[in-house]
Image (cartoon, coloured by chain):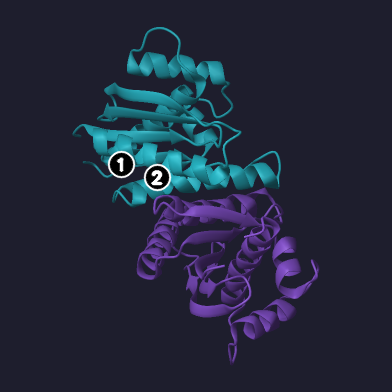
Chain colours: A cyan, B purple
Amino acid sequence: MHLKRIIGIDPGSRLMGIGVIDSDGRYNKHIYSDTLRLDGSNPIPERLGIIFTEVKRIIEQYSPDEFAIENVFMAKNAASALKLGQARGAAICAAVTSKLDVFEYSPKEIKQSVVGKGAADKQQVQHMVKVLLNLQGRLQADAADAMAVALCHAHAGALKARLQGK
Amino acid sequence: MHLKRIIGIDPGSRLMGIGVIDSDGRYNKHIYSDTLRLDGSNPIPERLGIIFTEVKRIIEQYSPDEFAIENVFMAKNAASALKLGQARGAAICAAVTSKLDVFEYSPKEIKQSVVGKGAADKQQVQHMVKVLLNLQGRLQADAADAMAVALCHAHAGALKARLQGK
């Protein structure tokens, strides 16, 4: 299986994790990661514009082959779900207008894939992301989650390829 | 007060109302209206891409001065709020990437502005949109709501201009 470049997104209306990795499903390499910090005192439309523009900029800079994003079904309440949905919508628009296929994974699928346990805590996810990508030092939680999404997609793709006998 | 072109949006993940009007706050003219119908069996990312592209196309075609969208705080549940938020985020991204200022109005503000009563029903809104824009025949509900958003913004702008003594 050849090396694929994957951009992973952990969506949020205040903090958005973005990670880019290269992977063949077994071997994984960290290419880029960052946390987009959105000033909560700025109007929502301005923040959505920043998300769209920044995700698009990173897509143009790193030319990923595929786009993976965490699929959140649960939220504290309808108001926070609406905010999260808007942020997610902005990131997905950046992907589809760049002609990238979008793949979605639930938090449980991501944890299962990266830690081997659907109910893993944040520390375990951060630890395994560091191990899988051979990273040193501290890792910001949202950036780690974004790389976990990308790794989950890489593993899912590898599994699919194996099942299909490729 | 000079004539302003306003695009109004009634957001939804299945049906999205879009309306364009010219207004000086008293005189209002219908320019364009339609309902974007999104196939619910299509994947969400594809639908968000269609919303973004279509809203952007209408902005480019009609060159509105300002963008107004209904602000929904309530939803049946977190899952539907998330879907609605994504659709809203896609439409707002189309506006901000076109350098349009985005204005938001609650359903209550819109009804109050168009019908004179915050608790008006859909039929009253449709009736008053037809009266205010001098439209004949049947009006699709979501397109009517979108024009109501645009009219609400036109009235709010006129009020603000009057208050400021312009």
Residue behind mark 2: A103
Q: Chain of mark 1?
A: A
Residue that protrudes farthest toward the top in the picture = A137
**B139 to the left or right of A138:** right
Dot 2 and dot 1 within a common chain: yes
| Residue in the foreground of this view, choosing between B79 and B58 | B58
Check residue B119 in the rendering and tell me which mark sits there, or answer none. none
The chain ID associated with circle 2 is: A
* Residue drawn at x 41%, y 19% as measured from the top left: A129
Q: CA distance from mark 2 to mark 1?
A: 8 Å
User: Residue B127 placed where, x, y %?
Assistant: 69, 84
Residue B82 image point, x, y percent:
59, 49
Mark number for residue A66?
Answer: 1
Q: Position of residue B1 (x, y in %)?
A: 57, 67
The tag earlier along the polypeptide, 2 or 1, is 1
> In this orientation, which residue lies closer to the viewer: A146 or B100?
B100
Amino acid type indicated by mark 1:
Glu
Q: In the rendered image of this protein, does residue B144 appear above or below residue A24?
A: below
Density class for disc 1 (Cα within 10 Å; few <14, some 14-19, many ≥20) is: many
Where disc 2 sits, the SS reads strand
Q: Does A64 appear above or below B43? A: above
Q: Are marks 2 and 1 in contact (CB under 8 Å)?
A: yes
Q: Nearer the viewer, residue B111 or A32?
A: B111
Q: In the rendered structure, which amino acid carries the disc numbered 2?
A: Phe
Query: In this orientation, which residue lies closer to the viewer: B32 or A33?
Result: B32
Tell me which residue sits at (50%, 60%) in the image: B66
